Image (tube, grey):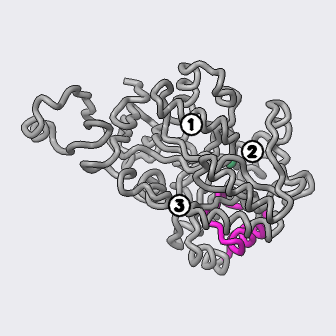
Amino acid sequence: MHNGKIKAIGRTASIKALHGSSLAVDYNCTGMAITAGFWNSHVHILPPELLHAERTPAPALTAQLQTMFTRWGFTTVFDLGSVLSNTNLIRSRIAGGSVSGPRILTVGEPFWGANGTPVYVRQYLIDNHISLPETTSVSQATSRVDQQIHNGADGAKIFAGSIEESGVLLLPPEIARAVVDETHKNHRLVFSHPSSIKGVELSLDAGVDILAHVSTFEGPWQPPLLERMKAAHISLIPTLTLFDVEARKSGLSEQAAQSLIHLAVSQLHAYASSGGQILFGTDIGYTDHYDTSEEFKLMSQAGMTFPQILASLTTEPATRFGYSSHSGTLAPGMDADLVVLNADPAADITALSRIVYTVRSGKILYSNH
Ligand SMILES: [Zn+2]
């Protein structure tokens, strides 16, 4: 690796013969596996430890970003809802070198309608003095998209279906459509939180690009819906572990929790086996379940093979988000973002969570060696 890029790949002897003295440091990775750095396409820059970037010392920010992201191999993350000005500050401190962390892409503040703040974040927002706007007209939607993209957002996120005490509240379709159209006009992608089948249909009608979760209200996805999703080139971020975490948090019985997880796994199975694009994501930063091993096990249960799961962590997101010319694969000239695992994930999928080193731009951001 040189100047943040991969310079050469090969056996030690051939690299030394070619590059000799430019090989400055040796790391012994005998018996380990090396992959491209991982992408997590659904996170939140929202934990209290990250909320006040203007007054948090660099080592504390670095430690929290390591606990959430780099310790699990993530060299790029997509934040699907946060305070944009704060996330921008963290990004600029990482870019300036004072804080170590992953590449962070963000949608900034998400879009929901009148009374559409999800019930499960209300108290958190109040406790932390965060006010996120409700969008109640098409003109408001359009100008907010323009403003956020002007301020650095890399995409937009709508709550097509927002979970409220009374059930799933759907975003007015004209607002969903306005957010999508304006974001596309700015050459960026739109994520949607569907919650229910009606939420998936509303997302499709509006023209969104990526579902931020499977939907667990209103039953399994039937073939006609899957066909529509495929035809619309929808990418799916399953976030299966989230449904386990939520089931435990809300005190569901073991049987009810199992059937919720089973439904989530079956949605992923249905879309992955029909050839839909899957992007790895866990919703960490909303949940504090940072360990990725359960997600890999559940993705396997959904029938995804090791190469498919690895692709959901690397080549698929790099392609979907327009980074494939320099990210997602290991080859000379690509970003020197890589992960060293202590075992072979082709033999045991949970090896994808047993990280020895996480390297971004040629620098070690996490080591347990
Ligand atoms: Zn989320």
Q: Residue at x 55, y 21 (%)?
A: 58
Q: Which residue is mark 1?
A: 291
- Corner quadrant of residue 14: top left
Callout 3 amino acid: Ile
* CB at disc 2 and ligand 1 closer than 8 Å: no
Q: Which residue is mark 2?
A: 246
x%, y% of residue 335? Answer: 34, 45
Secondary structure type for disc 2: helix
Instruction: Tell which of 334 and 28 is nearer to you.
Output: 334
Disc nearer the start of the sequence (3/1): 3
Instruction: Tell which of 122 and 152 is nearer to you.
Output: 152
Give the alpha-carbon distance from disc 2 to disc 1, as whole Å.
Answer: 15 Å
Q: Residue at x 61, y 73 (%)?
A: 229
Callout 2 amino acid: Glu
Is 123 covered by the magenta stretch? Answer: no
**Cβ–Cβ under 8 Å for marks 3 and 2:** no
Q: Which residues are the magenta region?
A: 197-222
Q: Is residue 195 shown to the viewer in this render?
A: no
Secondary structure type for disc 3: strand
* CB at disc 1 and ligand 1 closer than 8 Å: no
Callout 1 amino acid: Asp
x%, y% of residue 142? Answer: 73, 62
- Circle 3 or circle 2, nearest the eye: 3
> Which quadrant is home to the N terminus?
top left
- Circle 3 or circle 1, nearest the eye: 3
Secondary structure type for disc 1: loop
Give the alpha-carbon distance from disc 3 to disc 1, as whole Å.
Answer: 20 Å
> Which quadrant is home to the C terminus?
top left
Residue 278's disc number: 3
